[in-house]
Image (cartoon, rainbow, N blue to C red):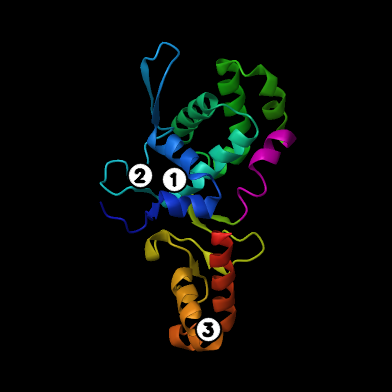
Amino acid sequence: MQLTGIGLYTFHEAAQLTKIPLRDLRRWLDGYSYRDKKHIPVSVAPLWETELADDSLDGISFHDLLEVRFVHAFRKHGVSLQAIRLASQRARELFETDYPFTSRQFRTDGRTIFTSAMEETGETELLDLVKQQYAFRKIIEPSLYRGIEFGEDQVAARWYPSSRSKAIVLDPSIAFGKPIVTNGAVRTSILYDAFIAEGNKNFVAKLYEVPVAAVDAAVAFEESLAA
């Protein structure tokens, strides 16, 4: 598969970047199996087929990475995976995109789609949450959409993961979507490793021809991933 413009993240990298437990990522995007009360094996399919599902690479794409952040937010508010799956399927058809949660249209039409899905799955105790536009937006805004830039197709094109800065960006068209410094387009992990080895940010900045501020941002970002 051609990975240019798609991005590639291992599940471990995805867990670090999204702060979602690795086990949840695997269950949602790989599917899982269990035995019911009668000890009969039951298989649960992934919430959607990831962009790399047909490839031998064990990882996910840029759009999968952003999309699963929305799943995590809905789960934290008690929405079932069944309702999320149904809403995702309907939004995919309505918006004609494989990644509906991160499309611009979801910000305006998502509430209606989730209301319908939750009525069908019987989650009546949560319906008040999604029926109210303000309450629904508390789930998906501002943190989930903050930092996402959209392309002409109204689908996410790049993501600035730091809420207070645009110094770091994930762009699937550069470095397979790995975090880079905006000023210089060098991977944050490379700058961080160089700083650890050299112990001098000014030297690293000169070595990679980036501002010292970019090295500072890279070091802070990589340390935040390990926290």
Q: Position of residue 76 (x, y in %)?
A: 63, 36
Q: Which of the labelled discs sits on residue 81, or is there none? A: none
Q: Check whether the beta carbons of the residues at disc 1 and disc 2 lie within 8 A of each other.
A: yes
Amino acid at circle 1 = Asp
* Residue that protrudes farthest toward the top in the picture: 38
- Tag 1 secondary structure: helix
Gap between marks 3 and 2, in whole Å? Answer: 39 Å
Amino acid at circle 3 = Gly
Amino acid at circle 2 = Glu
Residue visible at 48% across and 45% down in the picture? 22
Residue visible at 32% across and 45% down in the picture? 52
Above or below for 170 versus 107: below
| Residue 135 belongs to the span the image colors magenta | yes
Q: Earlier in the sequence, mark 3 or mark 1?
A: 1
- Tag 3 secondary structure: loop
Tag 1 residue = 64
Gap between marks 3 and 1, in whole Å? Answer: 36 Å
Q: Check whether the beta carbons of the residues at disc 3 and disc 2 lie within 8 A of each other.
A: no
Residue 109's quadrant in the figure?
top right
Q: Is residue 96 visible?
A: no
Front position in the image: 110 or 67: 67
Q: Earlier in the sequence, mark 3 or mark 2?
A: 2
Q: Which residues are magenta?
A: 134-146
Above or below for 43 versus 210: above
- Nearest to viewer (mark 3 / mark 2): 3
Tag 3 residue = 199
Tag 2 residue = 51
| Residue 140 belongs to the span the image colors magenta | yes
